[in-house]
Image (cartoon, rainbow, N blue to C red):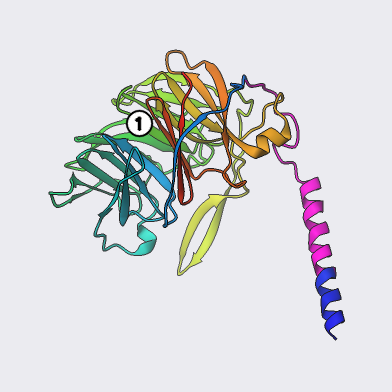
């Protein structure tokens, strides 16, 4: 009887293996073939400066302000504050009474001693000075927003559905009143896809005084000033310029539905941020002059000049125990990389 059970388990395991292999061979994955572009890879490895293990798993590096790094897990209820030398840490607790499903997604900006917490589904910004002042809450007028970043104590920038509900626009919002200061239709070619094709990552760099918006699924990025004027519209070095997104309504019961993409969208770009003279973009695509083994063992970051949007070079970021990073951000000549419950600091090459 025992031998029969073992035989059946082996048979099932082999069947699953062959099914997975069949799916892998038949699926047109973007990095199985050449993608039509090349990279200039900086040959030397990044110099390791420091590393630190944390007890709790973490998800995101939100801000580097003063001498502190600010991180969170999956919810904004607790913000971990770690010194730049990774020796001291403390926790900022935020008392939030909203239901758990309303707490995400969220965005945090900390410009010491000011804290700004953007709650997308609650259409609200929670703000104030810490740790000696109670936080205030401002309701943002309009619909639920999808992206947000604080640009000053007086204002934030959000990406939100326009009045037609068919596309997304950028709005500058008053932190105190929640009212729209300005609206701009920045992304071209949205048609009626609800902005799903042009989804991306929004970042603000105080030193440069610029916002960057890098699309996830197409080779487009935008450098924008805080008054929502486009200073530069550029392209990443890959060749993915079009994505066909079909909408699908997911029935959630009780007469409620959610609109989602009809099929999976393949990411071209992942995280991005501005530091110094460059826009840094974590790419999801292998270049033609990269080996598959190098690409699979590392995350690759491309640099573009802020002055003209031109590609400069690329460098590799090691995967920790074969796992990719969770979040990455730079400040001056230091790259801060979060691997779940581990922080690693590298020296950036100029």
In the depicted structure, whether residue 147 falls above or below residue 103: above
**Total number of numbered labels?**
1
Picture residue at 29% right of the left edge, 62% below the top: 98
Q: Is residue 49 left or right of residue 15?
A: left
Residue 111, percent from left and from top: 25, 36
Residue 283, percent from left and from top: 57, 32
Local crowd size for mark 1, using a 10 Å CA cut-off: few (<14), some (14–19), many (≥20): many
Picture residue at 51% right of the left edge, 42% below the top: 196
Residue 147 visible in the shown view = no
Picture residue at 57% right of the left edge, 24% below the top: 314
Residue 290 vs residue 142, the one in the foreground: 290
Res 269 quadrant in image: top right
Residue 96, percent from left and from top: 26, 60
Query: In the structure shown, which secondary structural element does the residue marked by tag 1 occupy?
Result: strand
Q: Residue furthest bottom?
A: 1
Residue 220, percent from left and from top: 52, 27
In the depicted structure, whether residue 236 falls above or below residue 76: above
Quadrant where the N terminus sits is bottom right
In the depicted structure, whether residue 6 falls above or below residue 326: below
Picture residue at 41% right of the left edge, 35% below the top: 202
Res 50 quadrant in image: top left
In the depicted structure, whether residue 180 falls above or below residue 15: above
Res 313 quadrant in image: top right
Residue 98 vs residue 90, the one in the foreground: 90
The part of the chain drawn in magenta is: 11-39
Q: Is residue 164 left or right of residue 154?
A: right
Asked if residue 24 lies in the magenta stretch, the reply is: yes
Q: Residue furthest left?
A: 133
Residue 197 visible in the shown view = yes
Asked if residue 137 lies in the magenta stretch, the reply is: no
User: Which residue is identified by label 1?
Assistant: 204
């Amino acid at each position: 009887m025992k031998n029969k059970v073992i035989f059946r388990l082996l048979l099932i395991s082999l069947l699953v293996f062959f099914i997975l292999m069949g799916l892998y061979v038949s699926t047109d994955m973007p990095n199985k073939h050449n993608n039509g572009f090349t990279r200039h890879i900086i040959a030397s490895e990044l110099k390791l400066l420091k590393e630190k293990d944390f007890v709790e798993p973490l998800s995101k590096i939100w801000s580097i302000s003063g001498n502190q790094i600010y991180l969170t897990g999956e919810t904004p209820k607790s913000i971990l504050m770690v010194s730049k030398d990774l020796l001291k840490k403390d926790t900022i607790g935020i008392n939030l009474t909203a239901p758990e499903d309303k707490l995400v997604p969220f965005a945090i900006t900390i410009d010491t001693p000011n804290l700004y917490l953007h709650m997308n589904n609650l259409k609200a910004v929670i703000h104030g000075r810490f740790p000696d002042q109670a936080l205030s809450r401002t309701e943002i007028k309009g619909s639920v927003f999808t992206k947000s970043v604080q640009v000053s104590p007086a204002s934030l920038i959000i990406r939100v559905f326009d009045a037609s509900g068919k596309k997304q626009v950028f709005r500058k919002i008053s932190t105190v009143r929640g009212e729209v200061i300005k609206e701009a239709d920045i992304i071209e070619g949205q048609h009626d896809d609800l902005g799903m094709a042009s989804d991306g990552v929004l970042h603000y760099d105080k030193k440069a005084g610029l916002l960057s918006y890098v699309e996830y699924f197409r080779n487009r990025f935008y450098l924008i000033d805080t008054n929502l004027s486009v200073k530069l519209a550029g392209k990443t070095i890959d060749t993915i310029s079009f994505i066909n997104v079909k909408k699908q309504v997911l029935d959630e019961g009780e007469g409620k539905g959610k609109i989602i993409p009809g099929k999976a969208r393949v990411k071209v770009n992942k995280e991005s941020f501005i530091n110094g003279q460059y826009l840094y973009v974590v790419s999801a695509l292998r270049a033609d002059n990269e080996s598959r083994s190098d690409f699979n063992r590392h995350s690759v970051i491309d640099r573009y000049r802020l002055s003209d949007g031109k590609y400069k070079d690329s460098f590799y970021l090691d995967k920790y125990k074969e796992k990719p990073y969770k979040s990455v951000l730079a400040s001056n000549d230091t790259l801060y990389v979060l691997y779940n419950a581990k922080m690693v600091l590298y020296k950036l090459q100029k």
